[in-house]
Amino acid sequence: MVDTLQIAGAVIGFGPAMALMYLTLKDYTWPKAQKPFFDDRKIFMFFALGVVLGMVIFAFESYGKLISSSYTWLVLVAGFALMEELMKLIILNFPRFQKKVDTAFYGLSMGMGIAATYTFAMVYVFLVDVGVAGPIEFGAAFLLGIMFVLLHGSTTTIIGIGVSRGDVKGYFPEALLIHILFALMYESFFVQLLPPPFNLLGLAGAAAIAGYGYNKVHKLSLPVLIQDAKRLNQRAAQKKRVSQ
């Protein structure tokens, strides 16, 4: 039977992910773009794939935390970040998606799907552990959820852009670095390597890293990708006219 905490987790997980996906994609499809840069059906397919991957990732990370200790948590944090980003790369780097502009947008969609279910599970567990959940606890859960939406949305899109440009070696390390730095900052708050309130610096650092990553994708990386694609199309059209 569905309870209040499950509903809250679903709203916090899926709401921001779908809203941010819409706000980012709307500039690249009709009516703002006469010719959309992606296929709507594939957008939803990749989102659904991300939904499944999000639960798998959460299960692996939860198990890892159970077997970790104060001596191994740093290795596990970096290891899980590497595993997750490699999984995204393997999926997006299939030959059919290489050097195609729309791959970047499918990466965004898949990242939001991952964030939606991962955040749903994470928020639900967080609220259950809290016990008595009030406005402060729900507010904290919402902020934590936003951070993971920004993280997975940005890192998966960065990898997708690298595949689109045929420059995986240049973009994958950036996505991995963002993820590892975020994870180290975020986990430092919960394992309390620093006493309160200094451990809040870890949480603030994680939020700053996630926000930076997504802002760069939204304001710089995707617009520049589209500008470059348009220039290449114009050059190809000019060469075609000359040859005729």
Image (tube, rainbow, N blue to C red):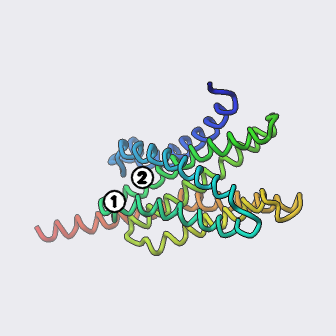
CB atoms of marks 2 and 1 within 8 Å: yes
- Amino acid type for the residue under numbered disc 2: Tyr
Where the C terminus falls, by quadrant?
bottom left
Label whose residue precedes the other's in the sequence (2 or 1): 1
- Find residue 81 and report its horizontal and vertical position in percent: 59, 63
Q: Is residue 223 visible?
A: no
The residue tagged 1 is: 97
Left/right placement of residue 157 relative to residue 147 reads left
Q: Residue at x 49, y 58 (%)?
A: 157
- Amino acid type for the residue under numbered disc 1: Phe
Where the N terminus falls, by quadrant?
top right
Q: CA distance from mark 2 to mark 1?
A: 9 Å
The residue tagged 2 is: 106
Name the secondary structure under disc 1: helix
Q: Residue at x 43, y 71 (%)?
A: 168
User: Is 31 placed above or below 107 here?
Assistant: above
User: Circle 1: is it few (<14), some (14-19), or many (20+) Cα within 10 Å?
Assistant: some
- Find residue 145 and report its horizontal and vertical position in percent: 66, 46
Q: Quadrant of residue 127?
A: top right
Determine the residue located farthest toward the left in the rendered image: 244
- Find residue 130 and report its horizontal and vertical position in percent: 79, 41
Determine the residue located farthest toward the top in the rendered image: 1
Q: Is residue 138 visible?
A: yes
- Find residue 119 and report its horizontal and vertical position in percent: 62, 45
